[in-house]
Amino acid sequence: MAVYGPGQDDPRGPALSDMMSACLARNWWAMLLRGLLAVALGVLTLAMPAVSLASLVLVFAAYMFADGVLGIISAIRAARRQERWGWLVLEGLLDIAAGVAAFVWPGLTIIVFVALVAAWAIISGGAMLGATYRLNRQHGRWLMGLAGILSVIWGVLLIIAPIGGALVLTLWIGAYALVFGITLVILSFRLRSRRPA
């Protein structure tokens, strides 16, 4: 499968890019909710850095589950309109699986939790990068790409330094969630301005 860089539309299917862009524009509110949830997670985490890792795992699990449900809702709406929905459902299922795993095993060690979060960030970011190439430039392709890149970078940083301590992990999660959420909120308003009538 050919990959087209930023600023390049897929020459095989501009109609596919238009359909994906229209789908995201119609569902701008789901992107806004995802962004607001991430901002809330970031603010709470940065405001209370001494929170126990067990509590952080549960807060993170709740965020992942909600984010996954919103991703599935977006995929269902896209499928009903006969539009591409694969990347959205994949990301939603991965988010729900990560959230359920964190709820079921709240006593995970720091290393296992860090590995779970790192894997989620890398896979989720990769899924967003994959979806980026189907989005029209005018709909905010670079913002979706930036959110995907931030997610992958954050996951790699967690793998490089897994035992930075609960406080450092808390601050990383807070900073990541805040930047990621703000990026999605900006993207949602850009998509809202481009939604079809």
Image (cartoon, helix red, strand yellow):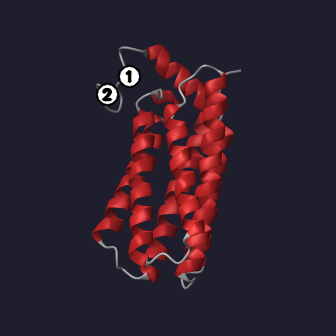
Q: Is residue 151 left or right of residue 30?
A: left
Q: CA distance from mark 1 to mark 2?
A: 7 Å
The residue lying toward the viewer, choosing from 134 and 68, is: 68
Is 20 drawn above or below residue 69 in the view shown? above
Q: Is residue 89 left or right of residue 11?
A: right
Residue 9 coordinates in the image, percent (x, y): 38, 22
> Which residue is identified by label 2?
4
Amino acid type at image mark 2:
Tyr
Residue under the image location 40 percent in, 40 percent down? 129
Is 182 drawn above or below residue 53 in the view shown? above
For the question of whether residue 194 can be seen, the reply is no
Residue 110 coordinates in the image, percent (x, y): 43, 77
For the question of whether residue 117 can be seen, the reply is yes
Label 2: few (<14), some (14–19) or many (≥20) C-alpha neighbours in 10 Å: few
On residue 9, the disc is 1
Residue under the image location 65 percent in, 21 percent down? 81
Q: Quadrant of residue 154?
A: bottom left
Q: Is residue 178 left or right of residue 14?
A: right
Residue under the image location 55 percent in, 20 percent down? 19
Query: Of the residues under marks 1 and 2, which one precedes in the sequence?
Result: 2
Q: Secondary structure at mark 1?
A: loop
Amino acid type at image mark 1:
Asp
Outermost residue to the front: 104
The residue lying toward the viewer, choosing from 102 and 9, is: 102
Asked if the residues shown at circle 1 and circle 2 are in contact, with their CB atoms under 8 angstroms apart, the answer is yes
Q: Secondary structure at mark 2?
A: loop
